[in-house]
Image (spheres, helix red, strand yellow):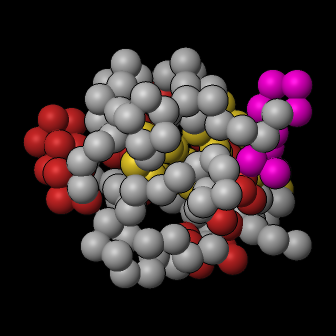
Amino acid sequence: MTTIYDFTPESSDGTPHPLEQYRGKVVLIVNTASRCGFTPQYEGLEALWRRHRGEGLVVLAFPCNQFGAQEPGDAAEIARFCRLTYEVGFPVLAKVEVNGAGAEPLFVHLKGERPGILGTQAIKWNFTKFLVGRDGRVIDRYPPQTKPAALEAAITAALAERDGVFGEGI
């Protein structure tokens, strides 16, 4: 069975970023853009990451320029923007495509695991979010309009799961 641990996207510097390093963590994967109406969600993503990173949450941002050309910058510009504007501390990886023939294989997998409304696999816009459990499998998919704070309960539940059993010490 394929999980996110089978994928190695690129870091913003072009080096391999194996997702195997996140085995046992809860991962929130988001396609992002710096010039989008949803860009302020970086603040909420950072807040979630700061609050739960000690419990095993990882947030991974994948800049994408496929929607309204809202991420035109290069890796250095994107990193600078995220750091200076939203004090982002979680990984911002290489710019990717999420739809079409050039789609990052990780996103092809995520969309196949959790299709959108009416079974459509295409990502409709920036800031689509995929919550992945400690086992590397997709728990759920959230549309761009879902603010990061609305994911708190789902993230808390995913963090509480250990070896397929919910609850601490079980």
Indicate left or right for 53 with 2 as reference. Answer: left
Name the quadrant containing residue 140.
top right
Residue situated furthest front in the rendering: 101
Question: Residue 80 placed where, x, y %?
Answer: 14, 50
Between 63 and 100, the residue placed more toward the observer is: 100
Evaluate whether residue 54 shows in this view: yes
Question: Residue 13 placed where, x, y %?
Answer: 28, 73
**Predominant secondary structure in magenta?**
helix
Residue at image location 81% in from the left, 25% down from the top:
117
Indicate left or right for 14 with 135 as reference. Answer: left
Q: Is residue 160 above or below residue 147?
A: below
Question: Residue 85 placed where, x, y %?
Answer: 15, 35
Name the quadrant containing residue 43.
top left
- Which corner quadrant holds the C terminus? bottom right
In the image, the segment drawn in magenta is 111-119
Residue at image location 45% in from the left, 52% down from the top:
62
Residue at image location 42% in from the left, 43% down from the top:
65
Between 47 and 20, the residue placed more toward the observer is: 20
Q: Is residue 101 above or below residue 18?
A: above
